[in-house]
Image (spheres, grey):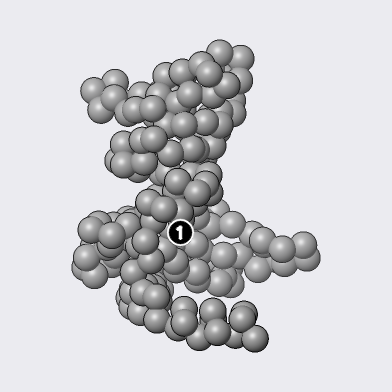
Amino acid sequence: MTDIARIIEVVEPEAKALGFDLVRVRYFKGGEIGDEEHTLQIMAERPDTGQLVIEDCAALSRRVSDRFDELEEAGDVLIEDAYRLEVSSPGIDRPLTRAKDFAAWIGHEARVELSELLDNRKRFRGELKGFDAETQAISIEDDGVVFEVPFDLVSNAKLILTDKLIAASRPLDTSGADEILEEQED
């Protein structure tokens, strides 16, 4: 069994060494129908922008691969199976995995899933209204009702792509965008 906590323990210092914050690490099988390959997905961001450019992803991928190889040579195999390493920025409709993510995206729409029932439901979709750092509670308005959701009950959460979110997200690198627009106009 793959120990995701151990993988995070190894990956996080590699991300920090490059000046990145780790957003999420997941290990899963498949992704497409018939795909039996495992994937180690690492999402990271620059703290000042919340994004990574392709060169950042490549640098983190190399560091993680090199570190995993070093550990394997020393007899510490983190992942037994063959796997694909996927390093990316969290993207516009990013996952919300840390308390600071919820605080940073107040006013935007999100989908939040819980590990157990709260008010007879596990899923909430609506505007993030607040985050109470003291109680670690997320306020989300769903169908006109504001729910206080304990952060430790959140099993999965992500922003919902809206015009407001697009307007709030600016790409770091727009090189090549002119060529794409020209091709579409032809």
* Residue type indicated by callout 1: Gly
Rendering quarter of residue 6? bottom left
The single residue placed furthest to the front in the displayed view is 185
> Neighbour class for label 1 at 10 Å: few (<14), some, many (≥20)?
some
Quarter holding the N terminus is bottom right
Residue 171 vs 183, above or below: the answer is above
Q: Residue at x 47, y 82 (%)?
A: 178
- Pinpoint residue 139: horizontal percent, then vertical percent: 40, 24
Name the residue: 29% across, 21% down.
135
Q: Nearer the viewer, residue 63 or 162?
A: 162
Tell me residue 87's x, y (percent).
44, 68
Residue in the image at 55% along x and 84% along y:
182
Residue 114 versus residue 8: which sits nearer the camera?
114
Whether residue 23 is visible: yes
Relative to 77, 46 lies left or right: left
Residue 63 in the image: state x and y as whole percent. 33, 75
Q: In this rendering, does residue 70 appear at all?
A: no
Q: Is residue 59 above or below residue 41?
A: below
- SS under mark 1: loop
Query: Nearest the camera: 143 or 81?
Result: 143
Say if 5 sits above or below 102 in the image. below
Q: Residue furthest right?
A: 34
Apparent side of residue 150 relative to residue 2 in the rendered image (left or right): left
x and y percentages locating residue 46 in the rendered image: 28, 62
Instruction: Answer left or right for 15 relative to 139.
Output: left
Total labels drawn: 1
**Residue that numbered label 1 is attached to:** 91
For the point 25% across and 28% down, which residue is it?
A: 133
Q: Is residue 1 left or right of residue 43?
A: right
